[in-house]
Amino acid sequence: MASQKALAALTQRFGKLETSEFRGQTRVVVPRDKLLDVVRMLRDELAFDLLVDITCVDYLNYRNAQHRFGLVYLFAVTETNERLTLRVFLDEPQLSVDSLVPLYEGANWLEREVFDMFGIRFEGHPDLRRILLPEEFTAFPLRKDYPLQGRGERHNFPVLTRDEG
């Protein structure tokens, strides 16, 4: 659970931010252009020393959704187990956000996975390329508009076989 001190400090520095709580977990919505500043404050001043995860949600066809994509960043203070979730909403065609790799080296592969599956670009990432799918793959399979049966991409890739022997 995020402390009221952390929320108060974020509000004092960045003004009123949308917050919510569910089952003891606090979520804060951060504008795209403030993400690096907020995360730097979490790390340097509020002791959030662990980036737990980065993921994305595609809100296509969700009732009352105001944005297409929601990036989800999970942070923790390892000493106290305090946790905080940041959310950044994105809409097409502007599907990019600043990379957190300069602040948390562990963001490297997490951002690559989100890029690979959803097509979100992380500006300033040192090596933003596919991590799960081949470079020739042109779609983003975790987007809600990707067909359940795929688009027939398998014929574009070489068949891999095991050597007999």
Image (cartoon, helix red, strand yellow):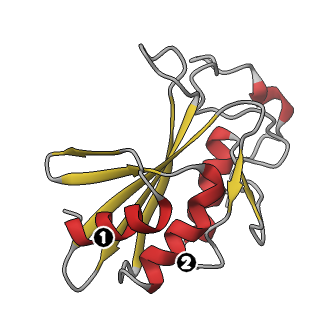
Mark drawn on residue 48: none
Say if residue 93 shows up in the picture: yes
Say few, some or many: other residues with alpha carbon within 10 Å of mark 1 (under 14 / 14 to 19 / 20 or more): some
Q: Which corner quadrant holds the C terminus?
A: bottom right
Residue 156 occupies which quadrant of the picture?
top right
Residue 138 relative to residue 101: left or right: right
Q: In the rendering, at what x and y percent does residue 67 appear?
A: 56, 28
**How many badges with numbers are in the image?**
2
Say if residue 3 shows up in the picture: no
Residue 148 relative to residue 151: left or right: left
Say few, some or many: other residues with alpha carbon within 10 Å of mark 2 (under 14 / 14 to 19 / 20 or more): some
Q: Is residue 80 above or below residue 34?
A: below
Residue 36 relative to residue 159: left or right: left
Q: Is residue 43 above or below residue 35?
A: below
Q: In the rendering, at what x and y percent does residue 59 appear?
A: 50, 26
Badges 1 and 2: C-beta atoms under 8 Å apart? no
Q: Which of these two is toward me, 36 or 127?
A: 36
* Eye-nearest disc, 1 or 2: 1
Q: Which residue is mark 2?
A: 104
Going by the numbered disc 1, the residue's amino acid type is Ala
Going by the numbered disc 2, the residue's amino acid type is Tyr
Q: In the rendering, at what x and y percent does residue 107 appear?
A: 57, 69
Q: Which of these two is toward me, 121 or 16?
A: 16
Residue 157 occupies which quadrant of the picture?
top right
Residue drawn at point x = 30 percent, y = 70 percent = 6
1 or 2: tag closer to the N-terminus: 1
Q: In the rendering, at what x and y percent does residue 17 appear?
A: 42, 50
Q: Which residue is mark 1?
A: 6
Residue drawn at point x = 47 percent, y = 21 percent = 65
